[in-house]
Amino acid sequence: MIGLVVVSHSERLAEGVCEVAAEMASDAPIVPAGGTDDGEVGTSVERVMEAIETADDGAGVVVLVDLGSAVMSAEMAIEESASEAVIADAPLVEGAVNAAVSATGSKATMESVRESAEEARELSKL
């Protein structure tokens, strides 16, 4: 199954997004990577890399990010990781929910899961 990683500047935010996504798709492997190694607000390449490797069962990983340096940390972690992973350009919560539901499909691929996450950009809330 395609794994998911949620990268946020906040550890609690990353965990919360994973909690919401798991409510919609409890079978999806979704791993938070929030905050810095010392528990501060920020991002950590090492935490993201560990999360990618935890989420990957061999089928690959889609990474969702919040903003700014989360993108750079995710890119660096993907470069250094032995796992295959891609970043989805998607809103964090809605994209994670879409990706988690998509990842549980029997024909899910990294590309189809990433596309599902990115389709969340078009969702209207009103």
Image (tube, grey):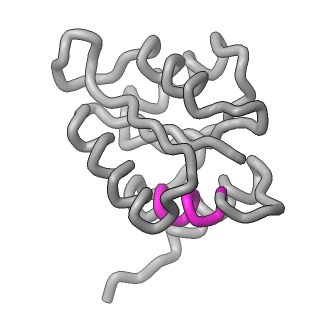
Identify the image quadrant of residue 57: top right
- Closer-to-camera residue (103/46): 103
Question: Measuring 16% from the left and 19% from the top, which residue is drawn there?
Answer: 40
Q: Is residue 3 above or below residue 117?
A: above
Residue furthest bottom as drawn: 126
Question: Measuring 64% from the left and 11% from the top, which residue is drawn there?
Answer: 80
Identify the image quadrant of residue 108: bottom right
- Closer-to-camera residue (99/19): 19
Question: Measuring 44% from the left and 40% from the top, which residue is drawn there?
Answer: 6
Q: Position of residue 102 (x, y in %)?
A: 65, 64
Q: Position of residue 41 (x, y in %)?
A: 19, 25
Q: Is residue 1 left or right of residue 9?
A: right
Identify the image quadrant of residue 126: bottom left
Q: Is residue 17 above or below residue 10?
A: below
Q: Position of residue 20 (x, y in %)?
A: 34, 60
Question: Measuring 56% from the left and 16% from the top, which residue is drawn there?
Answer: 76
Residue furthest right as drawn: 107
- Where does the magenta region start and end? 95-103
Q: Position of residue 81 (x, y in %)?
A: 65, 15
What main secondary structure does the magenta stretch of the protein show?
A: helix
